[in-house]
Image: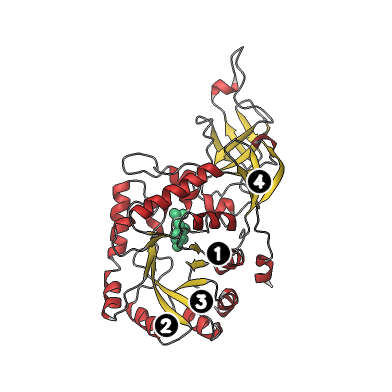
């Protein structure tokens, strides 16, 4: 039932009968600048190609089959999804290779895996527990083939196994069952991604991988060299490529960029380098209860609020403060509060302003569609966020 509900969702882009400007959008509206996103996709594909690493972008960021298809066209070896429901949406839209990066531990999730596993799909899952392995052994049909990666942890403490006996037990279980094949290992050091200083980020990431050395040795001793060694993200896109044994990187946020990432330092800069802001939320100024502030129509329901605040690049001296579910308050500098005789205030009621989003993944999950802006600056189409709410 739940599976049917997500696989019956629309996935195709919808063209508008005529292009419109951002000012004409029903705000708050999620705006995606397609040429900038394309540039980010190409830049990442080229960078990883130069380092002979596979490009396995994480679709938890965009949740949109149309974008996943564009990443595949740009050379991605496959996509990642965080959960089995996201995988169901992507598989249903025709994506041919999917790695689900969160382990499962129950039979109901294993049933979903069984339902989406087809001969046309390379379906890869991570495993880090006996419970997860038992659930899959109980539910996967004899004629299905699932690639299993061991999810390894040493320092993050989110998912992944640390115990070497468990690693060997799971390896035995995988090897002795014809429905499964040992596809490799995954390691994602999420706590490293937003370390501001580049050198510190590099050291932390290298240390996190080094801590897995005993596990790689165990696999070597067993004669089980992992075909796939996958991990990393936007924060380590230019760090983890130096690891010889890493086969591919699971970059997600680079495609849009968000304010949280923009504030992370690059190799020789205080700001993140290499990717541009492609995603904004357009909001309308709707009320001005006092001269020093103006209220826009986007709050917690338009922006994820787990990190920094939204930022309007066109008005860098204007501060956004959340003011509840539906509203944000802009703190105006004094020049806007009392403009001179011939000066108009830069912010007026009815004006539409675009904001860089604090954290892109959970912001996308608040919206039904992207409004797609093309090179002429106009909105031409809508792309459905088909895996919205697929957090199960
Ligand atoms: C397992 C895993 N891989 C990759 C990513 C992508 O990370 P980023 O958005 O920093 O590129 C995430 C994001 O949380 C993740 O959980």
Residue 63 vertical position relative to residue 117 in the rendered view, above or below: above
Q: Is residue 314 visible?
A: yes
In the displayed image of the protein, which residue is found farthest to the top? 341
Q: Toward the viewer: 62 or 44?
A: 44
Q: Which badge, 4 or 3, comes first in the chain's sequence? A: 3
- SS at mark 4 in the image: strand
Q: CA distance from mark 1 to mark 2?
A: 25 Å
Q: CA distance from mark 4 to mark 1?
A: 22 Å
Identify residue for label 4: 381
Q: Quadrant of residue 374?
A: top right
Q: Quadrant of residue 120?
A: bottom right
Front disc: 2 or 3: 2
The reply to whether the C-beta atoms of the residues labelled 1 and 3 are less than 8 Å apart is no
- Report the residue at 43% width, 59% height from top: 250
Front disc: 4 or 3: 4
Identify residue for label 2: 174
Identify residue for label 1: 95
Q: Toward the viewer: 271 or 70?
A: 70
- SS at mark 2 in the image: helix
Q: What mark, if any, has residue 105 been given in the picture? A: 3
> Is the distance from the Cβ of mark 4 to the nearest ligand 1 atom less than 8 Å?
no
For ligand 1, give the image quadrant.
Answer: bottom left
């Amino acid at each position: 039932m739940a599976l049917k509900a997500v696989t019956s969702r629309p996935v195709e882009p919808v063209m508008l009968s005529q292009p419109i400007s951002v000012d004409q959008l029903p705000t708050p509206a999620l705006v995606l600048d397609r040429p900038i996103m394309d540039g980010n996709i190409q830049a990442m594909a080229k960078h990883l190609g130069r380092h002979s690493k596979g490009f396995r972008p994480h679709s938890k960021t965009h949740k949109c089959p149309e974008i996943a298809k564009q990443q595949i066209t740009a050379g991605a070896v496959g996509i990642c999804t965080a959960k089995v429901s996201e995988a169901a949406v992507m598989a249903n839209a025709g994506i041919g290779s999917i790695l689900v990066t969160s382990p499962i531990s129950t039979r109901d999730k294993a049933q979903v895996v069984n339902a989406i596993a087809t001969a046309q799909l390379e379906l890869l899952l991570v495993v880090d527990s006996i419970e997860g392995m038992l659930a899959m052994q109980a539910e996967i049909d004899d004629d299905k083939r699932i690639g299993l990666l061991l999810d390894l942890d040493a320092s993050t403490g989110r998912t992944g196994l640390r115990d070497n006996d468990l690693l060997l037990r799971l390896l035995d279980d995988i090897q002795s069952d014809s429905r499964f094949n040992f596809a490799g290992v995954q390691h994602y050091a999420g706590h490293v991604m937003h370390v501001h200083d580049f050198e510190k980020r590099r050291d932390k990431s290298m240390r996190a991988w080094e801590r897995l050395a005993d596990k790689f040795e165990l696999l070597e001793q067993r004669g089980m060299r992992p075909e796939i060694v996958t991990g990393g993200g936007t924060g380590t896109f230019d760090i983890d490529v130096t690891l010889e044994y890493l086969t591919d990187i699971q970059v997600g946020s680079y495609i849009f960029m968000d304010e949280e990432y923009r504030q992370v330092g690059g190799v020789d800069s205080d700001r993140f380098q290499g990717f541009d802001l492609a995603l904004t939320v357009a909001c309308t100024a709707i009320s001005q209860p006092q001269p020093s502030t103006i209220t826009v129509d986007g709050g917690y329901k338009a922006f994820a609020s787990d990190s920094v605040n939204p930022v309007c690049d066109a008005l860098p001296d204007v501060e956004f403060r959340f003011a509840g579910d539906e509203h944000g308050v802009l703190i105006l500098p004094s020049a806007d509060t009392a403009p001179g005789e011939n000066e108009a205030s830069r912010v007026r009621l009815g004006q539409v302003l675009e904001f860089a989003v604090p954290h892109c993944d959970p912001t996308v999950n608040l919206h039904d569609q992207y409004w797609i802006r093309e090179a002429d600056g106009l909105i031409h189409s809508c792309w459905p966020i088909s895996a919205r709410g697929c957090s199960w």
